[in-house]
Amino acid sequence: MIKKPWTRRQFLGASLAGPLVLRQAAAAGSSAAAASPLTPAMLEDLRAAVDEIIPASDGMPAASEVKSVEYLTTVASRHREFRSQLQGSLKGLRQVARQRFGKGFSRLTAAQRVEALRSFESKNAASFSNLRDDVYEAYYTNQRVWKQIGYDFYPTNQAGPQMKPFDDSALAVVRKRPRDYREVK
């Protein structure tokens, strides 16, 4: 478990380094799973968990489809505290699955996975929150997801997009209402 929260600079450094590391690994012909800091069982559980936390829907890809597992294993291989936190969350999730259903998390049905995640959240809220937040980070820092949600990345050291001027006609309906509607007494 991470002892103190990451600063914005640490978060951006880790999250923006992920896609670069993945590109370098792909160019070298290696896979994140080959050098993974997670056991094969943990990788299976992580893949199942990310897809239950962010499933495919409404034209959006599931978390595993945008390489969230690879992203998380890359960050875990580079940051010891993050690796310990992720491993702890996955061990706790597997333990809950075994206690409730007698098998590992990745072997459960979709409904059982959801139930196991809910049980894990109620038994260990901090560990669940860490896992959920890590999955969100992996998903929402992916450029494919950015394009689908209409997000444009603008570096903070450059001017970003300009806001459209306010359309004053949007207030016309409110201005036509009686005075006591518009003003607080």
Image (spheres, helix red, strand yellow):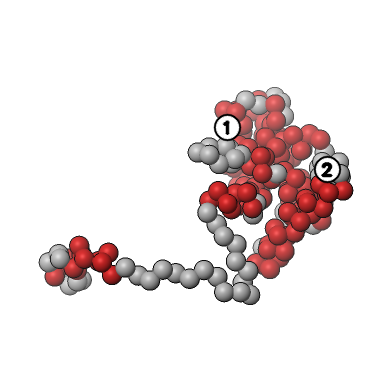
Image coords of residue 111 (percent x, y): 57, 28
Image coords of residue 44 (percent x, y): 74, 34
Please name the residue shown 67% across and 40% down the image.
64
Any mark on residue 137, and which? none
Answer above or below: position of 14 versus 145. below
Quadrant position of residue 15: bottom right
Answer above or below: position of 144 versus 97. below
Type of amino acid at the residue the image marks with label 1: Glu
Give 113 or 91, whichever is nearer the viewer.
Answer: 113
Spatial CA distance of label 2 from label 1 is 31 Å
Quadrant for the N terminus, please. bottom right
Answer above or below: position of 24 versus 57. below
Image coords of residue 166 (percent x, y): 35, 70
Please name the residue shown 79% across and 54% down the image.
21
Q: Residues within 10 Å of mark 1 (few under 14, many from 20)?
A: some
Q: Residues within 10 Å of mark 2 (few under 14, many from 20)?
A: some
Image coords of residue 169 (percent x, y): 26, 66
Give 36 or 143, whichever is nearer the viewer.
Answer: 143
Give 175 or 184, whichever is nearer the viewer.
Answer: 175
Return the residue at label 1.
Answer: 115
Q: Tell me if residue 120 can be seen.
A: no
Any mark on residue 31, and which? 2
User: Secondary structure under badge 1?
Assistant: helix
Q: Of label 2 and label 1, which has the lower sequence position? A: 2
User: Secondary structure under badge 2?
Assistant: loop
